[in-house]
Image: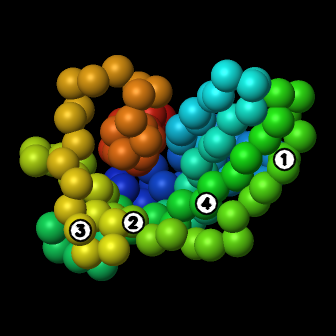
Amino acid sequence: MRRILFTLILCVVPASISSASGHAVFHTASFGDGGSVSLSIAEGRPSRYSAFDFDAIITLSEADHGGAVLYRDGGRHQVSVRCAAPAMVRISAVDYPVDVSIPSGGDWKHDLWAALCNAPVS
């Protein structure tokens, strides 16, 4: 049942927050010149690893102060996310703990965890 719920969440998340590229933006960092870098969920699915809940592909894009895309990373960066304690994001076989008590916007790993693990389900 849990896997079914996670699959439904993965269908809802990309539809709920979208960028010009059609990917679900989960974190944006702004810079003093008005530019920004956005991280997006390009793909997501239940994890193939038993210790994690989701596997996702994330992408990166840079925009100028007017929102025009200056750079779109062609890479597809695979991550795995564990929702339950201890919350965690795995990147390239390295596990990074996620402090779930911090507010959104400060740490991209927290924002990725929140986008996947706290997605509203109707």
Label 2 vs label 4: CA separation?
Answer: 11 Å
Circle 4 residue: 59
For marks 2 and 4 on the same chain, the one whose residue lies earlier in the sequence? 4
32 relative to 6 in the view: left or right: right
Q: Nearer the viewer, residue 1 or 105?
A: 105
Circle 1 residue: 69
Label 1 vs label 2: CA separation?
Answer: 24 Å
Asked if the residue under mark 4 is in contact with the one under mark 2, i.e. CB atoms within 8 Å, the reply is no
Q: Quadrant of the N terminus?
A: bottom left
Q: Position of residue 85 (x, y in %)?
A: 10, 45
SS category of the residue bearing label 3: strand
Circle 3 residue: 94
Label 1 vs label 3: CA separation?
Answer: 30 Å
Asked if the residue under mark 4 is in contact with the one under mark 3, i.e. CB atoms within 8 Å, the reply is no
The image quadrant that residue 95 belongs to is: bottom left
Q: Residue furthest left?
A: 86
Asked if the residue under mark 4 is in contact with the one under mark 1, i.e. CB atoms within 8 Å, the reply is no
Q: Amino acid at mark 1?
A: Val
For marks 3 and 2 on the same chain, the one whose residue lies earlier in the sequence? 2
Q: Residue at x 78, y 41 (%)?
A: 63
Q: Residue at x 48, y 55 (%)?
A: 10
Label 3 vs label 4: CA separation?
Answer: 18 Å
**Image mark for residue 79:** 2
Give the vertical position of 121 relative to 87 (above or below).
Answer: above
Q: Residues within 10 Å of mark 1 (few under 14, many from 20)?
A: some
Specify the color scheme.
Answer: rainbow
SS category of the residue bearing label 4: strand
73 relative to 12 in the view: left or right: right
Q: Amino acid at mark 3?
A: Val
Q: Residues within 10 Å of mark 3 (few under 14, many from 20)?
A: few
For marks 3 and 4 on the same chain, the one whose residue lies earlier in the sequence? 4
